[in-house]
Amino acid sequence: MGFEDEVRALIEKGPGELADPAWRFDAFENGKVLHGKRKNHLPAMGWNSWNAFGSGNTEKLTKAMADKLVELGLDKLGYVYVVLDDGCYQPFRKDGRIQNEEVKFPSGFRALADYLHDKGLKFGMYNDIGTNLCAGAAVGTCGHEKVDAQCYAEWGVDFLKVDNCYYLWDNATFSDAANARYVYAPNVKGIRLSKGAFSVELSAVKDGILWGERAEKKDTYVTCLGTFDGTGPFASPVGARSGELRFAVNVPEAGEYDLSVEYATGKEEGVGAWLQVAVGEIGSAELSFDGFVPETESPESFAFSAPIRVSLKAGENLIRIMNHRRQENTLHSYAAMLEGLNLAAPERDVILSICEWGKTHPQNWGYKVGDSWRILNDITFQVGSDGDAGRASWVSDYTTGVTAQYDKAVIMDEFAGLDKGWNDPDMMMIGMNGLTEVMNKTHFTMWSMMNSPLMLGMDLRNMEKGDALYNIVSNKAVIALNQDALGVQAKRVYASKMTDAYGKEGTRPDKTYIRDNDRVDILAKPLADGSVALSFINLSQEEKAEGYGVDKATILEYIGDKMVRRDAFEKASSYEVTDLWTGESARNESGKFEVKALAACDNVTVKVTPYA
Amino acid sequence: MHEAITIGEFVGLLWEGLTQGHPRSAMLWAKQGQVGGETATDKPAPGLDAPTRAAGDLELLEMARLHGWAEPQDVMLAGEVLRRNDAARLIHEFLKCELGEADEENWNAAKSLADLYDCHACVHHVAQAFCKGIMTAKGQAFGIREGQVVGMSKGQAFGMREPVTYEEAREVAERVFHKELRHVPGPPQAGQQDSSNLDDRELQAENVSAGSAENATQNAEALPRRLTEQEAAEFLAEHPDTLLVDVRTRGEFDAGHPDGAVNIPLLKLLEAPQTLLDKCDVAQSLLDKGDVPILLTCDAGYRAEIAATKLFEMGHRYVSYYGFDA
């Protein structure tokens, strides 16, 4: 079967039926992993080729990087994963198997893995859940998960980064834009419920209740019933990221009722053709319908659906009209990769790095199948090449820049953990043009405090032991924050500006989505030895000298429930405060931890340990 | 021709342009050996292996790959239809590798493209091709823009996976080598990046789509190109049919002017642009079509810029200007 025929067959088949409720939106908050996903992986540390060399990475360059990791002793500090990002395969499969691109990777992937393993390093590779890779190579895992996992196992892969280009069940990168029909419910005007003599008609606008985010009541109908695209920096990551239309209906007796939905289909962001109907609240609902409804002429030409059987109890029932397939389909596809890896090499512990750029808000479901999830589009689009360090920025438009990624990840701490996985604000830009030494220092501190994967992205041949960049990335005390056994991401306990991205004043610094970077943040992180790490961060490009502090009570209020030996911390009359960048120690007896001034883009990060 | 060009043919087109004696290419061939790190050794010795026009397609592709501006994948997929995002990549890498042209530092204009961020690997190449005025916007798409909190709106798009026609490929290749032909976009239009006013944005998008594709293109670019003295000299050397117009006063002109220039004082030109024809040996039809290269000049460049903008707005496509004493 030719490639095009294969794709056609996959499209015919459609996204999985997802009969098992474990796949469903309603199960996202139950904390349960799928396919026996292994837990307790600390954030991955290593080097990834993308920021350093883009699609120009080669076997030769990769080996040179591996040599440098060892020469610089970075491997001993934890940087062990050497990951080949996009750009290493031949554009077509051979006998159904993916192949190494022969000009850039002439020795093949097994040989490269062996080279890395011999040095005590680990080997990472890249693919996607769609049919083609971003650059077009027809080697996406969709429909080939088992055989691809087999290859990865044979090659000795320890880490797999997977994006969603050309994904069939959503309008992802280069997918058919009309795929929006899979991930949005149609526009809904109303519902009709009947059984025998009983019949009631309800208007979406007048009687319907909107739940969640973005669902919208127009003049005569409700639209945007689905999960909105999370790739851009415009929306907060906290809270429900989808919208439902709900009706509270009162029926005289229990039984099977016929529900008909007055709907109009589309195939663009906001209005689709896939309907989900459920009865009951999240956690105890029954899905009565989950599929396409016949297309109408336009998103404003309405028709009644064929009757849907719903099981109701006497009295009040909650009927939910929705579409959670954007998240559910994506979860299912990543799960297929995990399943394939389990089958191919059950004894191998392979890290799965989810990279759909935050489109489907993976912080809600990623923990079920993966070890980390990208939260946004890229931190830079101007990646380097051999001889060019690429461009980075501290603050910029859209998702680029250290601060854009930080601003979102910093309030996502509740989604992360040892039993879950980690928020991934993208690979680090340390070593790229455009960041000063101070910016690099703070960039590294932020990523460490936020329990993000620590992936270097520069040409390591430009780093020597003892130089400025080396001193930053080799700071053991700061790395130890990221690799702390407690595995709790730092929480923001103070922000000098609390106006959120929607213009409203927030009350909680750990949940308010702030994009104005002219501010100072204070982060608090509980550590396994009973200490607390505090980071005072000046995000602005001007000195801030108003004095910033946090007291014991606030620290306990925000992270007390996650601390070990919380009582000792609370009752202590003095603390040892160690600056993790200067190494200086001081004694604090007030229980209030302050910094008078912070230079532009600078941070002060201390470890606070109670004296016995 | 509305048929799509292939990847291999497009690479050939770029080579063709290079070896037709673009003035800078000779100098750059000599620089080849110094470019890059280890990959420099993979490159052919300077000047020796510049492909002749007789070289077959695959040889040209392989050469492009060796020089670093084509991917191995391009060689394997040479017969495939060229799509706009791949064209942008090839152009961008070609400009760097063969012409030594630096990136535009400011790529803000590209941020008005609704689909710019659709593919993370394409953003930089597309932004450069667009901001250098080599490839223009094409069509509309949904995109979520800065400041829009709810929903997406339609705006001008790049058309990432749209096939490139032979006609477009030729135009684009011309612009690679002839900077004065590039349609450099101005700063984002008022309303285009205005986050607070979605209605205005949608209105503007509608206005754009209501006009022809030509209009859409012209909306994407705002100003004619300013050249340096050096560039102007090169341009005149390459395009002997250029109308060189000095827009200073008669008195200033008589006291001394660039060789080959005709004099149409600015005020006269603005009042009665048809005087252009009176002064020049150019067929009415050609002038009407807007295809004649016109180079305006004055001492500092300010008056020339005004004149150039006026002519450009009238539909003359290849207008540029420079100050000969800037």
Image: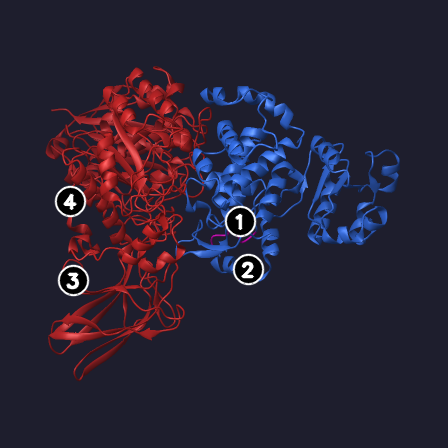
Chain colours: A red, B blue
Task: Determine whether the residue tagged by mark 4 lies in a helix, strand or loop.
Answer: loop
Helix, strand or loop: magenta stretch: loop
Badge 1 and badge 4 both on one subunit: no
What residue is shown with label 1? B4
Q: Which mark is residue A35?
A: 4
- Relative to A358, say whether B49 is above or below: above
Residue B207 picture location, percent across and down: 56, 60
The magenta-colored residue range is: B190-196
- Image quadrant occupied by the C terminus of chain A: top left
Q: Image quarter for residue A189?
A: bottom left
Task: Determine whether the residue tagged by mark 3 lies in a helix, strand or loop.
Answer: loop
Q: Which mark is residue B209?
A: 2
Amino acid type, callout 2: Ser
Chain bearing mark 1: B
Badge 1 and badge 3 both on one subunit: no
**For discs 2 and 1, the disc positioned in front in the rendered view:** 1
